[in-house]
Image (spheres, helix red, strand yellow):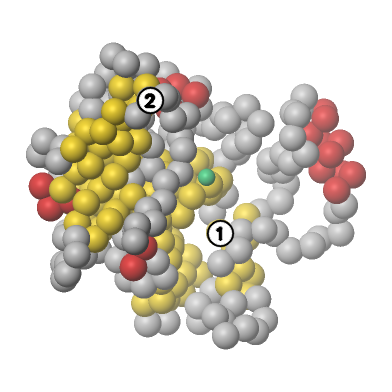
Amino acid sequence: MATEQPPDGRDEADLGAIAEKHGQKIPWVWDTKRPNRVGFFPRAGGAVTWITVPPSYISHTLNSYDDGGDIVVDYVEFPAPFSADQLSTSAPPALVRWTIDRARRRVRRTRLDDRPQEFPRVPDARVSRKHRYGYTAAAADFLKAYGHGSTPDSAFGNGLVKHDLATGRSQFHRFPKHASASEAVFVPRSGARAEDDGYVLSYVHNPDRNASDLVILAAQDFTGKPIAQIHLPSRIPLGLHGSWIAGT
Ligand SMILES: [Fe+2]
C-alpha cells in the first residue's frame, strides 16, 4: 500500500511555492487540482497499480488484508482538503473502509463509524490478515486540536472504542472529562484462542494528577472496570502511539 502520488512532472519547488503562498510552515500542502490515488503491488514484488480514490486525508490505518480478489483497507479518514500544518479540516475524522476491486480497479467506500476517533489498532497478530476487532481512541481534547470544538455526540466524549467488524457493533469505555486516551495496544492473554482474549493498554491523561496513567482493560469486558490503573510519574503527550514488547 502506498498513498503517495506518482510523479506527474511537478517538482518540489512548485509545492514549496504553494505552501508559502498559504502561509504554511511545512513543505507540503493540499492541491485541490490533483486527484488522490492509491497504489498497490504484489507482496512478492511487481508493478504498482494506481487507481483514483475519493479525496481524503489518511493519517493512520487500522489494518489491510486480501479478501479474495479485493483488498480491504480500514483507516481513519479526514475529509479533504486537510491542512497538515494547521491540523484543520472540514469535519472530524471517522472510521472508513475501502474495498478495492483489483480487477476492475474500483474502490467501494463504506463509513464504519461516524463518531470522531483516531489511533486505530488491531492485535499485532492480525496485521495484514483479516481482523474482527479493532480499537480506537476518542478524545475530546484531541478533537479540539483539529478545530472542531466539542464532540458532536455529547455521549461519546473521551474513551476507547472496541469495534466488532463482524457484527458492526461497538463498545465504548468512557474516561472522565479531560482524561484523554492515547493509542490502545492489544496484548493477548497467554494461551488465548479468541481474537479478543487479552488486554487493552492505553496511556490516559489523569487530570487530577496532571500525569498519565497506564490503564489496562480486559478486552472481553471492555466496558467494565479497568484491571489496573498504574500511576506514571509524568504526563505522556496526548496522541502518542504505543507498542508492547513482552519481557523475558
Ligand atoms: Fe502517527
Which residue appears at 62% of the width and 27% of the height?
86
- Label 1 beta carbon within 8 A of ligand 1: no
Query: Where is residue 236 shown, x and y percent of the image?
Result: 44, 30
| Numbered disc 2: secondary structure | loop
Place residue 197 in its image quadrant: bottom left
At label 2, the amino acid type is Pro
| Numbered disc 1: secondary structure | strand
Q: Considering depth in this image, is 128 or 47 the residue closer to the camera?
A: 128
For residue 197, side relative to residue 231 (left or right): left
Question: Would you call the spot at circle 1 few (<14 residues within 10 Å), some (14-19), or many (20 or more)?
Answer: some
Q: In the rendered image, is residue 196 in sight?
A: no
Q: Considering depth in this image, is 221 or 55 the residue closer to the camera?
A: 221
Quadrant of the rendering where the C terminus is positioned: bottom left
Query: Where is residue 198 shown, x and y percent of the image?
Result: 19, 57
- Residue 53 has which mark? 1
Query: Where is residue 87 shown, x and y percent of the image?
Result: 58, 30
Q: Is residue 239 above or below residue 62?
A: above
- Label 2 beta carbon within 8 A of ligand 1: no
Which residue appears at 48% of the width and 65% of the height?
107
Query: Where is residue 187 shown, x and y percent of the image?
Result: 28, 56
Q: Considering depth in this image, is 76 or 202 the residue closer to the camera?
A: 202
Which residue appears at 63% of the width and 36% of the height?
84
In whole angstroms, how far apart are the C-alphas of marks 2 and 1? 45 Å
Q: Earlier in the sequence, mark 2 or mark 1?
A: 1
At label 1, the amino acid type is Val
- Residue 233 has which mark? 2
In front of the other: label 2 or label 1? Answer: 2
Q: In the rendered image, is residue 103 in sight?
A: yes
Quadrant of the rendering where the N terminus is positioned: bottom right
Place residue 50 in its image quadrant: bottom right
Which residue appears at 70% of the width and 59% of the height?
5
Q: Which residue is at the far front? A: 248
